Image: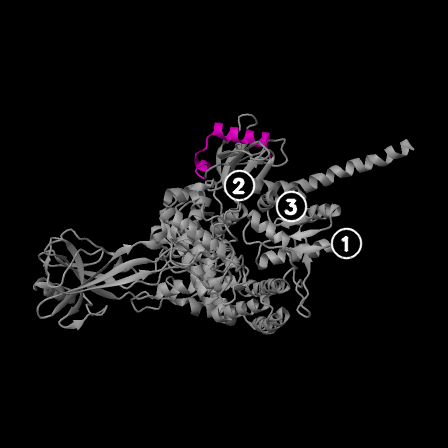
C-alpha cells in the first residue's frame, strides 16, 4: 500500500476515510526537522544549513520508514503553501537519509485546497514533484530569522540587560504598537463644538439636522472653538424660522466584500467575536481538517468556477433568484504575489449552512461567518437611496443639513455586512429620514431637555437646539484586527505568520492585551528604542516589506535565495559589528532621550521633570539592574539612592519611588518605612546607620497593594518568622514565614536531618494559622512528601468519555496550570486555550500528542530486559 503522509492525525483520519484500505495514511505531526539550536547552524559562506530531527519526530520518521518497508511508494500530501512544501521536503530528506530506504524510492507530492473526497482523489491521480522555488523561499526565510535571532539577540543582552530575544518581523510589529502608544501620549486634544436641532415636518415626523453654515460661511470643524461661539450659533438657529430649501435623493449601490483570505478572516473574527488571530486560525484548522472549508492560509480571494456556480445555486435556493446577479462576480488578488495557496477561504459544500453540520460552538461561529461571507460575495448588490436635506432661514444666515438613506433592495446585506473597526469614521448615512419635501416648514421641537454629556452643553431656551463640546481624539490603540490590517497594508509578514507574530510579542512580555487592545510594555519600549536607533534599517517598514518582495520573487523562481541571503548578511553583519564599540552608558542615555516624553513627562509647572525629587540636585535617568530589567534612579548615586520603577511616575499603578513612613514600632521606637527598591516594594525597620548597617526588611507579597499598606500590616511582615507554638508530640517549635515559593509552615523533629516545609494556600495563613491546622498540614506533608501536603487535583470540567478509546476525560486544576487527564496521561493546556473553551477534539489531540511522547522511553526500557534473557535461553536449546 502506498504511504501517504500528512501533518496531523485529524487530517490523516479524514483522508484515510476517502482513500480506504488501498493506502496507509500517517501523520508527521508538523515539521520533522529544524535547525540545530546553536550558533553556526547556518553557514554564511555557502548557505548550507545543519538540521536535526527532534526526539518527538524520530518515532514519526521510524513509523513512516517501517510502513515504506512494505511498499516503498511515498506520497507527500502536506498543506498547499510554503510551509507545507517545506514539511514535504524535510520528510523526503530525512527518509532518504535513513538506512534501509532506497535512494531511488518513488516520491510524489500531491496538494489539495480542500479535504473532500473529490479533491483528494483528484490530487492522488495527478502527482507532481516538490516545488523547489517554494522550498528555497522557506529556506531563505528560515535562515533570515535564524541570523537575526542568533546575532541581534546577544547584542540586546549585552547592551540592554534584561532584554529578551529580537525577531525579524516581530520587532517591526512591536515598533508599530510602540509608536502608536507614543502618538497617543504626545496627542494634544483640541476643543471644538457642534450644533444640532430637532425639527418636525408638517406631517408631525421628527428628524435631526446639523448646523453646516453660519452667517453665509461654511463651518469647518474648528470654527466653533469655544462655548461662547457655540452659544451665539445656538441663538442664531433658535431665533430664525426654518424651511426645507432642497431635497436631493440619489440612488446608489453597495457591493459585497470579497470572500475571506487569511488576514480578513482574522480581522473579522476579531471584530465580531473578539477571537484572537491564533484562536481563529486554530479553529479554522479544525474545520479544514474535517473537510468543511478550504485551506485557511491563503492570500488569494479568487474562487474555483465550480464553487462560484454552487454558491449561486445555494443563493437562489435559499433567498430567491432576485438575489443572484446576472453574471458571477470575479475577484482579483490584491497581493503582489499571492503564493500562499490557491483559493479563498470558503465552505467545501455551499449548500450546507452552520445549522446543517454537527460542530462545536467556536467552530460553528467561524463556519457561519465563512459561509455567509462566501455567499454574500456572489450576491446581488444592495440598492440604496441616499437623501440629503438642506434647511435654512429666508436670508440663509443659518443652514442645516440632514442626511440618511433608505434601503430599496437589501441584496447581499440580507446575509452579511462587514464589521467596522473602532477607528472607522461613523456616518450619518445609516439614519432613516421621514418623507420631506422642498418648501416644507421645519418646526423646532423641544427634545434636548434631558440631554446629558461628560462634556459641556449649550441649550436653547426651547430645548430644541443644542450645542455640544467635543475634543479631537488620539489614534486608537491597535487591536489584533487593526494590527493585522496595518501589517498587510505595509506588506509586512504573510498570512501564515500573523498569528505567530502576535503570539510571540505577547509571550515575550513586550506587549500585553487588555480586552482586545494591545499595549506596549516598558520592556517593549526599551527594545524598540534600542533597535530604532542602532538597527533602524532592520526595523524599517519599507525594508521589511522589500525583503518580503524578494522572498516572493524566490518562491516564483525569479530570484536565487542565496543571493538574497548574501546581500542581507553583508550589511547586517556590518551593523552588528558596529555595536561592539557601544558603551552601555551611551546606549542608556540615548534611550533616555528617546523615551523622555514617556519616562519624564512634563509637569506643567516649568520645572525640570528629570530633577530628583529627593535631593533636588541630581537628574533622573534610566538604569539597568544586575538581575535584568530597568529602573529610574538619581544620577548622584550613591550620595542619593532615590529610585522608582521603570516607566512614568504614578502611571499604571506603579509607585512614585517616594519613601513613606508608616509609623513607629512601639517597643523599639524605630520608624517603620515603606520603600521601593530595585526588586519591588518592601518594609524596613529604622534607617541604615553605622550602628545598624542592615536594618530588618521584609518584601511585600505580590498580592499586597503597596498603596494600601498601613503600620499594622507592616509590623506583621517585620514580625516574621512567626512562632505558632510547640509541637504537641516533640515540643519543637512550629514557625510560619513567607519564602521564595510562597507562604509555608516549618517544623524540625529531633530525629530529622532537615526541617520539613509545607506550603500554605494563602499568605494570610502565615499570620492566622493555629496549632491544630499547622500540625495537620505538616502531617500531610510527611505522609506525602512529593505532594507537598496539597490536596488531590481539583476537576474543573468533565469532558465525557474518550471518543475512540473510552475512559473518562476531564480538565484538572494543576500546580502549573490546567491540564487534561485521561487514564494515566496528563496533557498540559496551551496558554491560549482556557478550560472553558477546550473542545473534545482538542483534548483528544493533546492526549494523543502527550501519549506519543511518553511511550518511547517506556518501550526502550522494556526492550532491554528480554534481550538479556534471550541469549542464555538460545544456548540451552542448542
- 702 vs 660, nearest the viewer: 702
Residue interval drawn in magenta:
763-785
Write down the residue under mark 2.
841
Write down the residue under mark 1.
102
Image marks 3 and 2: residues in contact by CB distance under 8 Å: no
- Disc 1 crowd rating (10 Å Cα; few below 14, some 14-19, many 20+) is some
Distance from Cα at disc 2 to Cα at disc 1: 37 Å
Outermost residue, top side: 729
For the point 50% across and 47% down, the residue is 292
Q: Main secondary structure of the magenta part?
A: helix
Residue 573 percent location from the top left of the image: 60, 71
- Disc 3 crowd rating (10 Å Cα; few below 14, some 14-19, many 20+) is many
Q: How many marks?
A: 3
Distance from Cα at disc 3 to Cα at disc 2: 19 Å
- Disc 2 crowd rating (10 Å Cα; few below 14, some 14-19, many 20+) is some
Which of discs 2 and 1 lies nearer the camera? The answer is 1
- Residue 319 in magenta stretch: no
Secondary structure under the numbered disc 3 in the rendered image: strand
- 365 vs 413, nearest the viewer: 413
- 2 vs 297, nearest the viewer: 2
Image marks 3 and 1: residues in contact by CB distance under 8 Å: no
Secondary structure under the numbered disc 2 in the rendered image: helix
Write down the residue under mark 3.
25
The mark nearer the N terminus, 2 or 1, is 1
Q: Any mark on residue 287, and which?
A: none
Amino acid at each position: 500500500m502506498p504511504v501517504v503522509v500528512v501533518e496531523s492525525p485529524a487530517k490523516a483520519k479524514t483522508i484515510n476515510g476517502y482513500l480506504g484500505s488501498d493506502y496507509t495514511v500517517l501523520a508527521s505531526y508538523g515539521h520533522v526537522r529544524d535547525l540545530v539550536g546553536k550558533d553556526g547552524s547556518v553557514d554564511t559562506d555557502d548557505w548550507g544549513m545543519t538540521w536535526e530531527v527532534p526526539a518527538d519526530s524520530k518515532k514519526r520518521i521510524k513509523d513512516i520508514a517501517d510502513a515504506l518497508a512494505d511498499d516503498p511508494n511515498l506520497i507527500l500530501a502536506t498543506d498547499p503553501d510554503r510551509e507545507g512544501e517545506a514539511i514535504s521536503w524535510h520528510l523526503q530528506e530525512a527518509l532518504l537519509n535513513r538506512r534501509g530506504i532506497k535512494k531511488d524510492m518513488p516520491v510524489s507530492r500531491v496538494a489539495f485546497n480542500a479535504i473532500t473526497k473529490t479533491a483528494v482523489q483528484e490530487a492522488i491521480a495527478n502527482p507532481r514533484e516538490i516545488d523547489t522555488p517554494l522550498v528555497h523561499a522557506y529556506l531563505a526565510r528560515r535562515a533570515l530569522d535564524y541570523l537575526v535571532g542568533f546575532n541581534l539577540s546577544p547584542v540586546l543582552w549585552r547592551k540592554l540587560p534584561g532584554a529578551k530575544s529580537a525577531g525579524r518581523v516581530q520587532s517591526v510589529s512591536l515598533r508599530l504598537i510602540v509608536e502608536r502608544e507614543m502618538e497617543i501620549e504626545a496627542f494634544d486634544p483640541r476643543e471644538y463644538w457642534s450644533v444640532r436641532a430637532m425639527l418636525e415636518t408638517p406631517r408631525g415626523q421628527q428628524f435631526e439636522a446639523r448646523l453646516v453654515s453660519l452667517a453665509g460661511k461654511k463651518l469647518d470643524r474648528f470654527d466653533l472653538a469655544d462655548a461662547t461661539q457655540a452659544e451665539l450659533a445656538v441663538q442664531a438657529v433658535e431665533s430664525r424660522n426654518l424651511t426645507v430649501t432642497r431635497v436631493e435623493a440619489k440612488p446608489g449601490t453597495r457591493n459585497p466584500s470579497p470572500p475571506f483570505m487569511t488576514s480578513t478572516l482574522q480581522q473579522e473574527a476579531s471584530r465580531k467575536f473578539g477571537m484572537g488571530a491564533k484562536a481563529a486560525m486554530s479553529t479554522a484548522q479544525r474545520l479544514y481538517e474535517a473537510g468543511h472549508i478550504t485551506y485557511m492560509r491563503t492570500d488569494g480571494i479568487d474562487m474555483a468556477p465550480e464553487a462560484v456556480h454552487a454558491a449561486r445555486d445555494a443563493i437562489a435556493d435559499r433567498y430567491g433568484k432576485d438575489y443572484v446577479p446576472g453574471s458571477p462576480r470575479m475577484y482579483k488578488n490584491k497581493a503582489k504575489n499571492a503564493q500562499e495557496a490557491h483559493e479563498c477561504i470558503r465552505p467545501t459544500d455551499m449548500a450546507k449552512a452552520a445549522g446543517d453540520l454537527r460542530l462545536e460552538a467556536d467552530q460553528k461561529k467561524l463556519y457561519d461567518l465563512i459561509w455567509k461571507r462566501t455567499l454574500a460575495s456572489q450576491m446581488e448588490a444592495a440598492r440604496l437611496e441616499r437623501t440629503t436635506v438642506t434647511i435654512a432661514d429666508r436670508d440663509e444666515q443659518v443652514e442645516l443639513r440632514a442626511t440618511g438613506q433608505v434601503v430599496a433592495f437589501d441584496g447581499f446585506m440580507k446575509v452579511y455586512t462587514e464589521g467596522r473597526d473602532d477607528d472607522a469614521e461613523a456616518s450619518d448615512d445609516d439614519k432613516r429620514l421621514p418623507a420631506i419635501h422642498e418648501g416644507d416648514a421645519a418646526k423646532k421641537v423641544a427634545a434636548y431637555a434631558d440631554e446629558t454629556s461628560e462634556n459641556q452643553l449649550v441649550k436653547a431656551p426651547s430645548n430644541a437646539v443644542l450645542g455640544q463640546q467635543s475634543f479631537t481624539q488620539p489614534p486608537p490603540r491597535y487591536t489584533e484586527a487593526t494590527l493585522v490590517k496595518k501589517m498587510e497594508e505595509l506588506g509586512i509578514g504573510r498570512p501564515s505568520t500573523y498569528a505567530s507574530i502576535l503570539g510571540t510579542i505577547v509571550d515575550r512580555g513586550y506587549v500585553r492585551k487588555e480586552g482586545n487592545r494591545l499595549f506596549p510594555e516598558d520592556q517593549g519600549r526599551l527594545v524598540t528604542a534600542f533597535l530604532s536607533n542602532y538597527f533602524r534599517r532592520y526595523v524599517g517598514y519599507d525594508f521589511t516589506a522589500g525583503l518580503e518582495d524578494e522572498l516572493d520573487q524566490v518562491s516564483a523562481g525569479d530570484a536565487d535565495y542565496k543571493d538574497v541571503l548574501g546581500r542581507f548578511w553583508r550589511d547586517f553583519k556590518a551593523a552588528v559589528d558596529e555595536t561592539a564599540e557601544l558603551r552601555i552608558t551611551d546606549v542608556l542615555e540615548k534611550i533616555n532621550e528617546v523615551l523622555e516624553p514617556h519616562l519624564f513627562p512634563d509637569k506643567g509647572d516649568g520645572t525640570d521633570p528629570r530633577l530628583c525629587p529627593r535631593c533636588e540636585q541630581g537628574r533622573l535617568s534610566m538604569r539597568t539592574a544586575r538581575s535584568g530589567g530597568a529602573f529610574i534612579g538619581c544620577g548622584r548615586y550613591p550620595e542619593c539612592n532615590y529610585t522608582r520603577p521603570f516607566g512614568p511616575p504614578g502611571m499604571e499603578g506603579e509607585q512614585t519611588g517616594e519613601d513613606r513612613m508608616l509609623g513607629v514600632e512601639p517597643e523599639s521606637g524605630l520608624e517603620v518605612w515603606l520603600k521601593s527598591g530595585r526588586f519591588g516594594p518592601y518594609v524596613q525597620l529604622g534607617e541604615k546607620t553605622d550602628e545598624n548597617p542592615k536594618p530588618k526588611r521584609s518584601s511585600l507579597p505580590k498580592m499586597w497593594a503597596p498603596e494600601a499598606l498601613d503600620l499594622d500590616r507592616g509590623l506583621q511582615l517585620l514580625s516574621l518568622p512567626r512562632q505558632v507554638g510547640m509541637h504537641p508530640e516533640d515540643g519543637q517549635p512550629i514557625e510560619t514565614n513567607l519564602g521564595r515559593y510562597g507562604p509555608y509552615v516549618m517544623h524540625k523533629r529531633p530525629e530529622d536531618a532537615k526541617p520539613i516545609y509545607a506550603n500554605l494556600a494563602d499568605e494570610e495563613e502565615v499570620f492566622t494559622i493555629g496549632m491544630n491546622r499547622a500540625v495537620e498540614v505538616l502531617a500531610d506533608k510527611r505522609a506525602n512528601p512529593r505532594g507537598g501536603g496539597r490536596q488531590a487535583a481539583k476537576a474543573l470540567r468533565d469532558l465525557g468519555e474518550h471518543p475512540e478509546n473510552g475512559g473518562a476525560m476531564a480538565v484538572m486544576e494543576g500546580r502549573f496550570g490546567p491540564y487534561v487527564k485521561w487514564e494515566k496521561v496528563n496533557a498540559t493546556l496551551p496558554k491560549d486555550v482556557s478550560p472553558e473553551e477546550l473542545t473534545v477534539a482538542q483534548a483528544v489531540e493533546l492526549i494523543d500528542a502527550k501519549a506519543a511522547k511518553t511511550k518511547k522511553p517506556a518501550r526502550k526500557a522494556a526492550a532491554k530486559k528480554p534481550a538479556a534473557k534471550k541469549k542464555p535461553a538460545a544456548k540451552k536449546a542448542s
